[in-house]
Image: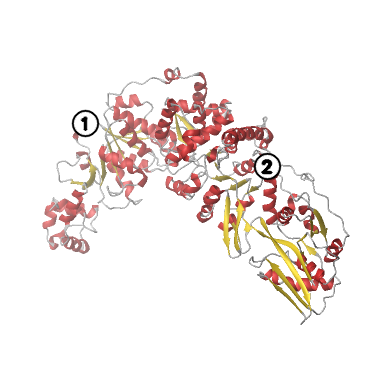
């Protein structure tokens, strides 16, 4: 008897539908599986056979053939056990009528028949729903995640036996999980935790207001990591569509567990500086999202920037332009979204005390070498650079009223709204993305300002690129004040955030 | 054949052997004509040196000398009249010099030459003082001599160039090697408005051992040596020692107690060096006239707006970060950034490193 069930595999964060067919016929007793299978799927045969036996289903001495379609896609992953088992059981007549029709199945089984959770359930179920499938059975541990997709009847099964019972009309539908389940109770971080540091906090706000990438420079222990970790809290709250995008990536990576099944906050990823290019970009025989994709719609924080290997940093160039990364691997190519804000941090020199020459023990050559380790193209993509000076004890002790993240976030939202309105007919949406050829149009200066900037250009040894960055940042500062025109004071502030370049440190200590 | 050039470039013959040869023979040409037996008879010349001298006569020194001239590198020895007289009589006087541009001439000597030396890793204040001093000296007609090292030396040269004066750099490497390499622009400008000088043959790489010795030429060429900033054990103090040995006046810029960068200077003052507490008086003592009178600080302050004055008052001669300025004035970032930019424009303050500010002197 012939039967067919629906399941899926994950490519990137997209799910590709796969059908599993089973047929039981007379002939030499055997269990054959075909359809371009990876080795972990081939192993599924032994797992399923034993699990069925231990669940109380006897496999008759017949010829059992299982086929996976479409046959041109390589099948990988461990989620095929449940579909295979149920397709075989249906062929043997253990499932009533059209119980398997329009049901999505996914799950790994143990030899005792228990179902094990798999990664990537959220995008699979979401995609199945789009295909018009209204019912699904997932392992119990994946139940909450699957139930996030509205309009899907989600059944969670603990064993193969339970799954069969569900298909035969027993079991109860899991209720749709509300987005905002249980407050985790852990204290969230907030900008008001940081005392003082007015200059750098302002720089963060400007950076977020125009989606500019940010570089923080400061001695060890000045609070760079603390500050960077709070930047997601002043980014505008992610909307439902963005939350879904983030959650899908985390689902595919198997990281949703700790987040109550749903990513409500913007992610903050801080890979260590020993990270390999693959760790950052994603990859592996079966590609998994890398750090840049896990930071999608959030903040990618690279602490100790000069310590990162050059090859690792070079990886960032394309995703920062394209907002996504395409990986080609043995098992096929896939694409992960990677729209993140880059926040990098570094010491001003090897010992960390420059420009305090009384403490700094680095020679100018050593300082130049330290800065030279950072990839130029990466620096070119960073618009704002801010220093964190070492705090004196007096400043540490002071506990004045500090602004909360919510207050800052409200202002940021307003500034971003202005930009969205201005660029509604363009293919970019914020000031950091204005292409070089159109800067004159959006960041126009009057003749007096032009003259002033010409003077600055010469005294500060600017390059064309750093000049453009100053204009873009000035545009953001003007937007923060809801000013249509860029004023001189906006330019002056933008100059304070100008990016470092090789010539910069040559200045005088 | 330039015999002096030959004598300066025999492998294995150093300053000491050369002086022995010259003391015995009188001039480079005479040395060239000595036979091996005669050479061996000279006190201080052994078998090895005699062989090397004999061997060197087979080499083509004329071609090398022509190549030197083609590259614009000048050569002068003690035997020539144009050799700076000041260097003839110092202890361990150099036998020959290589130079780009010019050597200090009689005119320069008459107008006074001042050596500005100090720490390589110096403070923003030290930079500013050296530059201002170089500028004032140049504007008053005096020349500046230094070693082109980073820090005080470079600022002294730079100030002199900005003041439109002449300046001379004595290197610890060959004159064709710009060290430190990033001072290329300065190096070329010095060669144009003065000269780059070295006693070492072109191609000599900078080595730590060569630098102390060149300091005797810096002090030897100058009328007076000014130490701007120096740590307790600093190379600048070697220059001061040479100056003392050569009977030159030494001045030091006084600094604060416990300030590591001023320890050397303060110690010099304690030992009897002149204290450079007022540039005007310093110039008077040196009989350098022609300095324009400048307005005092109080007069300058009248030119500032109220908010500018608030920021200016909180700055000092030590760099302060933007954060500190905000802390002390209570201004917001946009306000402070605007005021600081205006003050820089008016040349009341300077930005020494990114977002670190200092009063302009």
Crowding near the residue tagged with mark 2, few <14, some 14–19, many ≥20 C-alpha atoms within 10 Å: some
Q: Secondary structure at mark 2?
A: loop
Q: CA distance from mark 1 to mark 2?
A: 76 Å
Q: Is residue B199 left or right of residue B226?
A: left
Q: Nearer the viewer, residue A198 or B219?
A: A198
- State which quadrant residue B242 falls in: top left
- Picture coordinates of residue A449 (x, y %)? 45, 27
| Residue receiving disc 1 | B110
Residue A417 showing in the rendered view: yes
- Picture coordinates of residue B32 (x, y %)? 13, 56
The disc label shown at residue A285, or none:
none
Q: Is residue B217 left or right of residue A283?
A: left
- Picture coordinates of residue A179 (x, y %)? 76, 45
State whether residue A107 is above or below residue A245: below
**Protein chain holding label 2:** A
| Residue receiving disc 2 | A238
The residue most toward the bottom is A28
- State which quadrant residue B221 falls in: top left
Q: Nearer the viewer, residue B250 or A158?
A: A158
State whether residue A385 is above or below residue B111: below
Camera-nearest label, 1 or 2:
2
- State which quadrant residue A153 falls in: bottom right
Q: Is residue B314 left or right of residue A139?
A: left
């Amino acid at each position: 008897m012939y039967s067919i069930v629906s399941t899926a595999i994950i490519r990137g964060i997209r799910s590709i539908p796969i059908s599993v067919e089973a047929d039981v016929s007379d002939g030499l007793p055997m269990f054959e599986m075909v359809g371009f299978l990876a080795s972990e799927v081939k192993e599924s045969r032994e797992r399923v056979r034993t699990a069925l036996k231990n669940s109380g289903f006897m496999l008759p001495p017949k010829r059992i053939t299982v086929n996976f379609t479409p046959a041109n896609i390589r099948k990988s992953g461990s989620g095929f056990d449940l579909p295979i088992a149920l397709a075989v059981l249906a062929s043997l007549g253990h499932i009533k009528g059209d119980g398997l029709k329009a049901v999505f199945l996914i799950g790994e089984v143990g030899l005792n028949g228990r179902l094990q959770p798999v990664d990537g359930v959220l995008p699979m179920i979401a995609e199945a729903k789009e295909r018009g499938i209204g019912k699904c059975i997932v392992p119990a541990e994946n139940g909450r995640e699957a139930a996030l997709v509205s309009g899907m009847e989600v059944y969670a099964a603990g064993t193969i036996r339970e799954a069969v019972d569900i298909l035969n009309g027993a079991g109860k539908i899991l209720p749709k999980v509300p987005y905002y389940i249980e407050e985790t109770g852990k204290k969230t971080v907030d900008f008001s935790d940081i005392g003082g540091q007015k200059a750098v906090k302002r720089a963060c706000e400007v950076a977020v207001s125009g989606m500019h990438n940010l570089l923080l420079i400061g001695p060890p222990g000045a609070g760079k990591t603390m500050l960077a970790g709070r930047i997601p809290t002043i980014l505008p709250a992610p909307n439902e569509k963005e939350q879904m995008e983030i959650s899908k990536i985390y689902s595919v990576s198997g990281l949703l567990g700790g987040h109550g099944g749903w990513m409500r906050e913007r992610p903050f990823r801080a890979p260590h500086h020993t990270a390999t290019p693959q760790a950052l970009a994603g990859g592996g025989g079966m590609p998994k999202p890398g750090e840049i994709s896990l930071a999608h719609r959030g903040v990618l924080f690279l602490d100790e920037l000069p310590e990162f290997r050059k090859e690792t940093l070079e990886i960032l160039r394309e995703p920062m332009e394209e907002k996504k990364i395409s990986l080609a691997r043995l098992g096929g190519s896939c694409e992960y979204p990677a729209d993140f804000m880059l926040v990098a941090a570094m010491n001003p020199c090897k010992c960390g005390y420059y420009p305090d020459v009384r403490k700094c023990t680095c020679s100018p050559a050593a300082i130049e070498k330290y800065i030279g380790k950072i990839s130029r193209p990466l620096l070119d993509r960073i618009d704002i650079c801010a220093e964190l000076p070492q705090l004196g004890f007096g400043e540490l002790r002071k506990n004045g009223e500090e602004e909360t993240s919510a207050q800052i976030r409200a202002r940021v939202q307003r500034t971003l709204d202005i930009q969205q309105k201005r660029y509604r007919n363009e293919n970019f949406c914020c000031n950091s993305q204005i292409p070089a050829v159109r800067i004159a149009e959006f960041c126009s200066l009057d003749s007096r300002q032009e003259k002033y900037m010409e003077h600055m250009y010469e005294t500060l040894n600017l390059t064309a690129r750093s000049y453009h960055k100053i204009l873009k940042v000035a545009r953001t500062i003007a937007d923060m004040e809801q000013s249509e025109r860029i004023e001189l004071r906006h330019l002056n502030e933008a100059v304070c955030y100008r990016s470092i370049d090789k010539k910069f440190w040559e200045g005088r200590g | 054949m330039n015999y002096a050039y030959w004598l300066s470039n025999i492998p294995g013959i150093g300053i000491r052997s050369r002086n022995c040869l010259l003391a015995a023979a009188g001039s480079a040409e005479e040395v060239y004509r000595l036979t091996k037996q005669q050479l061996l008879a000279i006190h201080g010349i052994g078998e090895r040196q005699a062989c090397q001298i004999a061997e060197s006569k087979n080499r083509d020194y004329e071609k090398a000398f022509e190549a030197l001239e083609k590259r614009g590198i000048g050569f002068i020895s003690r035997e020539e009249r144009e050799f700076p007289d000041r260097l003839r009589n110092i202890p361990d006087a150099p036998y020959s010099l290589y130079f780009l541009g010019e050597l200090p001439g009689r005119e320069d000597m008459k107008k006074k030459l001042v050596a500005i030396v100090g720490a390589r890793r110096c403070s923003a204040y030290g930079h500013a003082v050296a530059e201002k001093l170089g500028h004032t000296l140049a504007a008053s007609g005096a020349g500046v001599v230094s070693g082109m090292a980073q820090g005080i030396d470079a600022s002294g040269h730079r100030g002199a160039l900005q003041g439109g004066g002449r300046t001379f750099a004595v290197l610890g490497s060959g004159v064709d090697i710009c060290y430190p390499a990033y001072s290329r622009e300065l190096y070329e400008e010095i060669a144009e408005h003065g000269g780059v000088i070295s006693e070492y043959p072109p191609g000599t790489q900078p080595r730590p051992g060569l630098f102390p010795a060149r300091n005797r030429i810096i002090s030897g060429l100058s009328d007076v040596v000014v130490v701007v900033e120096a740590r307790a054990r600093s190379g600048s103090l070697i220059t001061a020692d040479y100056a003392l040995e050569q009977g030159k006046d030494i001045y030091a810029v006084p600094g604060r107690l416990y300030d590591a960068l001023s320890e050397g200077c303060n110690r010099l003052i304690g030992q009897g060096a002149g204290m450079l507490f007022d540039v005007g008086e310093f110039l008077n003592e040196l009989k350098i006239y022609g300095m324009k009178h400048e307005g005092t600080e109080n007069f300058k302050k009248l030119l500032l707006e109220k908010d500018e004055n608030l920021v200016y008052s909180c700055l000092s001669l030590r760099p302060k970060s933007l954060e500190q300025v905000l802390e002390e004035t209570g201004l917001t970032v946009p306000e402070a950034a605007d005021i600081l930019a205006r003050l820089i424009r008016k040349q009341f303050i300077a930005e020494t490193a990114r977002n670190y500010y200092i009063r302009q002197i």
